[in-house]
Image (cartoon, coloured by chain):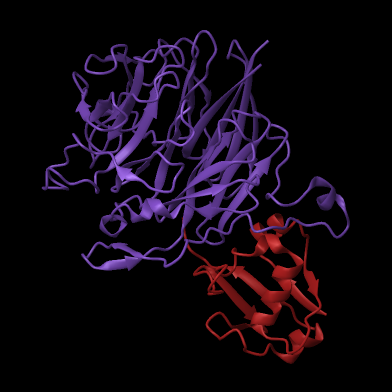
């Protein structure tokens, strides 16, 4: 089971509270987790990455095990700790003032 | 007894203000969608309980919200209330999927090059006058989308961008379709306006569009006196009884047309400044119009720190200041283009919101004003529903 931590506004939008747990079929990659998350919560489509190109939105960042994975390609495997459920996959709204 | 519902979009959420026909005692509901920018909230004329909202964020993009109970509850279109109640229930659908039709195309960029269209947000949602499930959405980068299923899915009316779209160029506020006017006497006719793009009309339900800018003068921005596109139209408005008569607040100049945009004539008259953003028409007097003069394109606040609405009862040219109840010193707010609206009670009410977070109401056509609220986030939009 993959644990995902959503930022405040996406928790509200998806009407979730706390962490989200997801089954991910096949290799656990950044892209596969986002696919599973959007399948489970379709309202999140378009909020983290573009509907069509699947390009990450500029102020959305991805972290796992204190590593910034935001710039990694979607096929990047996630660390074993995330795959085992020991650590969460973090989706973060970037610090951007205003 | 009639009642009033004011729908307010702000920089940090939506608010709903309600009162009876006296318009003295107001209840405030909100913030709805707290922390998100709410560009526009508007109810359907065909079903006042159906309300659409454009919720947007620099972080998380575009969301469309819909209420079917007058703003008490909201869902992203595509989710039934029963689905949301179940244990596995969650909002779903693709109501925020705004994809440009066909080849994306390019428009003029600041450096003179061509730049691809990129969807950023929905500025304005205009529900159909007859069908609650049909609505139009004005987008940045400029385009118009239509839904016929209550906002579950949206499809671009791409003919608009074929109307010299390669020559449109974003202004400082972004290149957005900010105004959509539906002709109540001809459902195939729609008017739209784009900042730094111009004003356009379709007579075939949105398949084809033509610029309607003859008579507009923008000598500094557009030296070509015959330029059809590129005029910075801030707002257009019409009275439903005379949809061929339009009023316009341009970047500079207030204008009117009496032939559906074929020719515009300036009616700035004795205004202290003809720069501004909103313009609107009295509910019962088609020649009575309202603007809020703003000092200049460089100084986006009222002249002399005095907030004044100006009213013309002659369709322009002759204007009178309306100041009773409005701050007459040290006032440096702005009133944005979508932030004025009128009710349709016998004594027509006029409403506007400011970037300082005030929403003002006049229950007597503008003669005197009261602040309904003082301290909301910056107000982006104000719409009014007159309920039976």
Q: Can residue B273 be seen in this view?
A: no
Give whichever of B125, B102 is nearer the camera.
B102
Where does the image place residue B369, in percent across and percent down from the top left?
45, 15
Say left or right for B230 vs B82.
Answer: left
The residue under the point 42% across, 67% down is B103
The residue under the point 66% across, 63% down is A44
Residue B368, quarter of the rendered image: top left
The residue under the point 21% across, 17% down is B317
Residue B366, quarter of the rendered image: top left
Q: Is residue B3 visible?
A: yes
Is residue B341 shown above or below B103? above
Where does the image place residue B138, in percent across and percent down from the top left?
46, 47
The chain coloured red in the image: A
Give whichever of B321, A64 is nearer the camera.
B321
- The residue most toward the front is B204
Is residue B154 shown above or below B2? below
The chain coloured purple in the image: B
Say left or right for A37 vs B13.
Answer: right
The residue under the point 52% across, 30% down is B383
Give whichever of A19, B124 is nearer the camera.
B124
Q: In which quarter of the image is the N terminus of chain A?
A: bottom right
Where does the image place residue A86, in percent across and percent down from the top left?
80, 83
Where does the image place residue A45, in percent across and percent down from the top left?
64, 65
């Amino acid at each position: 089971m993959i644990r995902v931590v959503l930022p405040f506004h996406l928790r509200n939008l998806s009407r979730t509270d706390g962490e989200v747990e997801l089954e991910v079929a096949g290799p656990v990659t950044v892209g596969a987790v986002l696919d599973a998350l959007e399948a489970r919560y379709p309202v999140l489509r378009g909020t983290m990455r573009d509907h069509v190109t699947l390009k990450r939105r500029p102020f959305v960042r991805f972290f796992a095990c204190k590593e910034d994975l935001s710039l990694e390609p979607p096929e990047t495997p996630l660390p074993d700790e995330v795959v085992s459920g020991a650590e969460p996959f973090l989706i973060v709204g970037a610090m951007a003032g205003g | 007894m009639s009642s009033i519902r004011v729908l307010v979009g702000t920089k940090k959420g939506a608010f709903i203000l309600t009162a009876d026909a006296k318009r003295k005692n107001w209840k405030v509901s909100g913030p709805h969608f707290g922390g998100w920018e709410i560009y526009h909230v508007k109810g359907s004329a065909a079903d006042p309980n159906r309300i659409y909202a454009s919720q947007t964020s620099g972080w998380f993009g575009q969301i469309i919200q819909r209420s079917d109970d007058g703003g008490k509850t909201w869902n992203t279109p595509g989710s039934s209330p029963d689905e949301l109640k179940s244990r596995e229930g969650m909002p779903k659908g693709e109501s925020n999927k705004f994809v440009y039709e066909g080849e994306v195309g390019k428009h003029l960029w600041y450096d003179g090059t061509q730049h691809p269209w990129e969807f950023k947000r929905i500025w304005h949602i205009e529900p159909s006058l007859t069908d609650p499930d049909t609505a139009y959405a004005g987008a940045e980068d400029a385009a118009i989308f239509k839904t016929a299923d209550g906002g579950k899915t949206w499809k671009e009316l791409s003919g608009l961008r074929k109307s010299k779209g390669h020559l449109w160029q974003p202004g400082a506020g972004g290149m957005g379709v900010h105004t959509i006017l539906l002709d109540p006497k001809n459902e195939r006719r729609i008017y739209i306006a784009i900042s730094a793009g111009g004003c356009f009309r379709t007579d075939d339900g949105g398949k084809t569009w033509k610029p309607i800018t003859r008579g507009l003068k923008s000598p500094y921005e557009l030296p070509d006196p015959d330029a059809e596109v590129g005029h910075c139209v801030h707002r257009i408005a019409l009275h439903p009884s005379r949809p061929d008569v339009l009023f316009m607040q341009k970047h500079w100049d207030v204008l009117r047309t009496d032939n559906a945009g074929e020719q515009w004539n300036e009616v700035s008259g004795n205004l202290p400044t003809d720069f501004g953003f909103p313009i609107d028409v009295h509910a019962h007097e088609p020649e009575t119009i309202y603007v809020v003069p703003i000092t200049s394109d460089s100084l986006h606040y009222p002249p002399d720190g005095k907030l004044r609405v100006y009213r013309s009862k002659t369709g322009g040219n002759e204007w009178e200041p309306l100041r009773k109840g409005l701050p007459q010193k040290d006032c440096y707010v702005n009133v944005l283009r979508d932030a004025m609206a009128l009710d349709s009670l016998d004594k027509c009410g006029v409403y506007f919101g400011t970037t300082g977070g005030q929403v003002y109401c006049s229950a007597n056509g503008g003669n005197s004003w009261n602040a309904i609220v003082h301290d909301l986030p910056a107000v982006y939009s104000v719409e009014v529903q007159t309920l039976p």
